[in-house]
Image (spheres, rainbow, N blue to C red):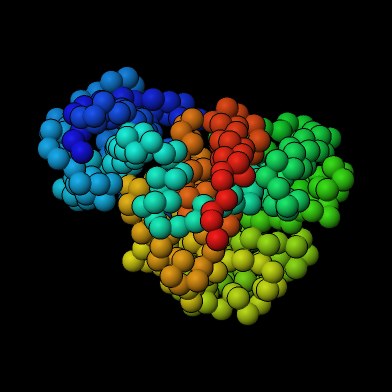
Amino acid sequence: MKVSGLRLRGILDSRARVTVEVDLTLGSGHQGTGSAPRAIAPGRLERSRGPEPVLGTFSAPALQAALTGSAVADQADYDGRLAGLYQAGEAGADVTLAASLAFARAAAAACGVPLYAYFAGLAGSIPAVPALMVNVFSGGIHLPPPARGFQQVMVLPATGGLRSDIEVAGAVFSAAERLAAQRFPAVGLSASSGLVVPAGSEEQLGLANDAAAAAGHASVCTFGVDVAAEHLAQTPGRYRFGTGELSCQDFAGVLARLAASYGLSYLEDPFDPAEASAWRGLRAVLPRSTRIVGDDLFATDESRIDQSLADGVLLKLSQAGTVTATLAAAAAARAAGMVLAVSHRSGETEDTAMCDLAVAVGAELIKVGGPRRGDRLAKYNQLLRLDESLHSAPSRPT
C-alpha cells in the first residue's frame, strides 16, 4: 500500500474547542477519515496533544512528507511511523490518532470489510457487543473548582440486549432529569451529556437510584462511578471529598460503603496512579460484584498494565495515540485476564471508531456519555448498527 494524500483540518469538538481531523487517500483510491477527541483534563500519564490546531485546513509539511509517497506494509508499519513522529516532537497524539484512524478506514475499505472487522483482524479477536455504562450525572471537574466528588455517576442497564438496554438508559436518564428539575433551580448538561446539578456524589447516586425506580427499571440496573481520583488528590495519600479531606484508608472506607449501599458494579480510578498500595488494598473491602477499573492509572499503555492493581483496563484511543498502540494495550489486558472497557472523552467529535474498537476486541463495557447531544447519539446509533451486523452475520461452520 501507498499513502498518496493526507489532508489535515481543525474541526470543532462537543465543547466547541478545535481538534484535528485527517483525510487520507491510498494509492488505490480508497479513502478514510479520522478525528481525535479532546479531554477536559488529560491524565498526567497519557500521551500529549500537539500545538493548538487552527480551524479549517492546515499543513504539516514534516508529517505529510514522512507519511506519503512510500510503501506502507500494514497498519502497524504506518502507526510505527506515526509513533516515531510523536517521539521526535513532529506530531502530537491528536494528530497521530486522527491519521491512524484515517488509515484504518481507508485500509478497511481496500479490504472490503467494515471497520470493526478490520480491527478484529488486526487484534485476532472475536467481536462482541459490549454492555452500556450511561453517564447520568457529571460532577468533579465538571463543577466549579476545586473538584470534590466523582466525575461521573453512571447507570448500567442489563436487560440482555443492546436495544432494550438503550431504551432503559433513556427512560432512567429522563426520570433523572425530572427528579433533578424538581429538586434544583437549574439543571445543566455537561460536555459528555451528563446532568450537572449542585449536589454531592452521594446525593447524585441517590438520585440515580431513585430515577431507576421511578422509571420502573430498578431490577435491571446497577450503578457505576468514575472517581477520577487524580483530580481529587492533595498531598500524597489524601483526597478532597465533599466538605472534607480524607486519608487513603478513610477514602477506601467511603468507597466501600457507597459500593455496598448503592450496588456499584463499576468503580473507576478510585485512587491516584501513584498510590499503588491503596489500589491493591481496595479489593479486600469492596463487594466482589464491584469491578475496579483503571483509566489514568494505565493510560492505555501496554507497559503499564498490572492485574494486581485493578480488575479491568479502560481503553481510550486518544491516550494511546494510534490504533496499534490501543490494540496492544487491549491484548496486554486480555493476557492478564482483565476486563476491557472502552471510553469516550469529554470533548467528542462525530467519529464512532471507538464503538468499532469496543466491538472488535469484545470489550465487556463501553461508555459514550449520556443519551443527549449529536456526538453521543452518533455512538449509540453506531452500536445499534454493529449489533445488527453481528446478529445478521452468517454463523461460523462447526
Q: Residue 300: percent from the left, percent from the top?
A: 40, 57
Where residue 217 appears, as percent x and y from the top left, is 83, 48
Q: Tell me what residue is drawn at x 32 percent, y 52 percent.
A: 324
Quarter of the N terminus within the rendering: top left
Residue 392 position in % (x across, y down): 60, 41
Q: Is residue 236 visible?
A: no
How many numbered discs sit on the rendered protein?
0
For the point 18% across and 35% down, the residue is: 2
Left of 216 or right of it: where is 169? left
**Residue 388 lies in quadrant:** top right
Side of 277 relative to 206 (left or right): left
Please tell me which residue lies in front, 63 or 29.
Answer: 29
Location of the C terminus (image quadrant) = bottom right
Task: Give the camera-side residue of 379 and 1.
Answer: 1
| Visible residue check, residue 395 | yes
Is 46 placed above or below 106 here?
Answer: below
**Image-based side of 385 in relation to 35, left or right:** right
Q: Residue at x 40, y 45 (%)?
A: 118
Residue drawn at 64 percent across, 31 percent down: 372
Place of residue 270 in the rendered image (x, y in percent of width and height, measured from the top left): 56, 64
Q: Residue furthest front?
A: 397
Instruction: Judge from the rendering whether residue 384 lies leftward or rightward of residue 57; answer left or right.
Output: right
